[in-house]
Amino acid sequence: MNRTKLFLPLLAVFILLAACTSGRAQTTQEVGWSNGTETVHGMLYLPSGSGVHPALVVIHEWWGLTDWVKDQAQDFARQGYVALAVDLYGGQVTNNPQTAYQLMSGLSQQRSVNTLTGAVAFLSHRKDVDPHRIGAIGWCMGGGFAAQLAIADPNLRAVVINYGELPTDRASLERIHAAVLGNFGGLDQGITPGDVHAFAASMHQLGKTINVKIYPNAGHAFQNPNNKTGYRPVDTANAKARERTFLAQQLKPGM
């Protein structure tokens, strides 16, 4: 057989596949926005395809905007969300618990909430984002801030709280209009099962949409594989499946 005749069809197929897949390449970029007093930054992950998408504010743990958190944001972009991973530490990242505690303790609560509400505003003004389909997700410290963002921004559609500090003030809970999903560890000594049950009960009494799950053999930060002694891969897979279903139901219906 003539090798040239064999090569040309294969080359044509290769070019066609390259053309089809090149449009699916995701875009990642550092972006900035105002929190009211200064410019703050984060990493923006864009899904493939044109048109309007739902969006997520992704909030890091007390370690800072680590590669693991960036990976989570990128995965959400693959699922079709415009994902904005917010940097509350201004570029500082650590794997030292003492340093992480100092960084977290040094945060201004109000400044951080302003940064997050500014992130929602930034997303809502993008042409590729449906402003009525914006949610938030966070882990550990970020889970607590996801709850605070839901209190501060009544336009937030959905929020996922992964073992984050839970609000208890009834007046604050009344201001939450987003549907809430929570994943918690039964062995967590910081956010205890009792705290979770009390939060869920209060939300139910107020007629809020709330779905929480406690993983009995998991502790704090069970979803992060960098947690060498507490990572729970099976529980993590279940929690991530819950998150994926929940966010799709709340942010993608009819899309």
Image (cartoon, rainbow, N blue to C red):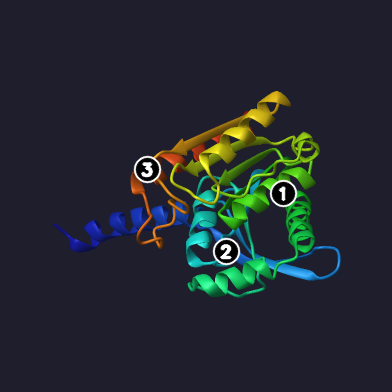
Instruction: Mark yes or no: residue 249 visible.
Output: no
Instruction: Mark yes or no: residue 203 visible.
Output: yes
The residue identified by callout 2 is 62
Left or right: residue 33 compared with residue 30: right
Q: Position of residue 177 (x, y in %)?
A: 74, 34
Kindly check if marks 3 and 1 are in contact, taking CB atoms under 8 A apart as contact. Answer: no
In the image, which disc is placed on residue 36? none
Identify the residue at horizontal 69%, vertical 68% (top origin).
41
The crowd level at tag 2 (other Cα within 10 Å; few <14, some 14-19, many 20+) is many
> Which numbered mark, 2 or 3, is in the foreground of this view?
3
Identify the residue at horizontal 50%, vertical 58% (top origin).
25
Which numbered disc, 1 or 2, marks the residue that appears first in the sequence? 2
In the image, which disc is placed on residue 217? 3
The crowd level at tag 1 (other Cα within 10 Å; few <14, some 14-19, many 20+) is many
Distance from disc 3 to disc 1, alpha carbons, whole Å, reads: 27 Å
Distance from disc 2 to disc 3, alpha carbons, whole Å, reads: 23 Å
- Circle 1 sits in a helix, a strand or a loop, which is it? helix
- Circle 2 sits in a helix, a strand or a loop, which is it? loop
Amino acid type, mark 2: Trp
Q: Is residue 120 above or below residue 176?
A: below
The residue identified by callout 1 is 148
